Amino acid sequence: MKEKITIVKVGGAVVEDELQLSQLLRDFSAIEGRKVLVHGGGRKATKMAERLGIETQMVNGRRITDAAMLEVVTMVYGGLVNKNLVAHLQANGVNAIGLTGADADAIRSHKRPPLVVDGSPVDYGFVGDVDHADGQMLSRLIEAGITPVMAPLTHDGEGNILNTNADTIASETAKALAPFYDVTLIFSFEKKGVLRNPDDDDSVISTITHADFEHYKADGTISGGMLPKIENALSAVDAGVGRVIITLATAIDGNHGTIIQANS
């Protein structure tokens, strides 16, 4: 029987809120056994870009990353956010190590080609679509008692850092570790789960399958940044990840939120 591992992805809004983040890190530290933390930081990157006079552009919840924005996200994700999380986890008794995809060749990707979105071509710039995540290397770290803290940056093997959606990092990390562990993947953010009504925090959708997702996407119930989150969650389920949950950052015990599952 495989050992259990919990992968928790924490979103940008929680990263910005000191109280929520402190609570999440305490809860994460209390999780028994093997674990991995994956973080975003998009809102911090947006604020830093604004301070530097760099415009932020988003398409379908994904950031356009030109050369100037790539410098911002590399500094913010790989430096400021990642190392602060590692330091806080050390203070909570968790022996953590911060990693981008370039570190130990953890996650390699290729630059996303221009895509047609709503009838118009969109060049996402220095954005990476994942080719491979090294679950064996990560498992060696984990078995040595080290908790990886994954930043949303990858590399292409040719010296280029690429901005990569944090939910994708979480999903690809979970898929890479699935051959070695019984994986629970938890996407935590500022809501109780996927909401049927964005104005009603209690309108949590209990389960979402592929069919449900297509329905909710078509009628507009699910839109914006929630689209790539659920796409990545479904991809993880399809690849053998045991459980995928989208939930509130203060409820990462696996008993709350929206469960993403294969079609019944």
Image (spheres, rainbow, N blue to C red):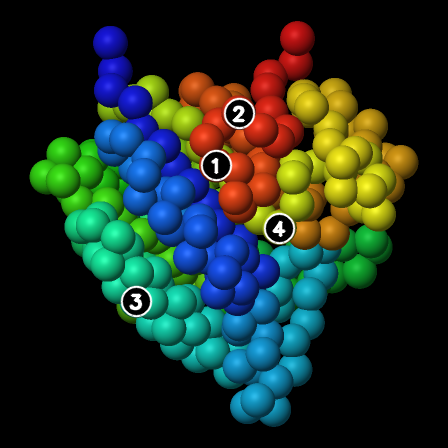
Crowding at mark 3 (Cα within 10 Å: few <14, some 14-19, many 20+): some
Residue type at mark 2 is Asn
Q: Could you tell me if residue 158 is visible in this image?
A: no
Which comes sooner in the sequence, label 3 or label 4?
3
Residue position marked by numbered label 3 in the rendering: 83
State the image coordinates of residue 141 (x, y, percent, origin top left): 16, 42
Q: Could you tell whether 50 is left or right of 171 in the image?
A: right
Which image quadrant: the C terminus?
top right
Choose mark 1 or mark 3, whichever is in front: 1
Residue position marked by numbered label 4 in the rendering: 190
Q: Could you tell whether 116 is left or right of 85 in the image?
A: right
Whether 101 is drawn above or below 181: the answer is below
Quarter of the image holding residue 60? bottom right
Please tell me which residue is depicted at 53% across the width and 46% down the height of the picture. 249
Q: Could you tell me if residue 77 is visible in this image?
A: yes
Q: Report if the CB atoms under discs 1 and 4 are less than 8 Å apart.
A: no
Q: Which mark is residue 255?
A: 2
Crowding at mark 1 (Cα within 10 Å: few <14, some 14-19, many 20+): many
Which comes sooner in the sequence, label 4 or label 2?
4
Residue position marked by numbered label 1 in the rendering: 252
Residue type at mark 4 is Glu
Report the residue that reaches farthest toward the left: 144
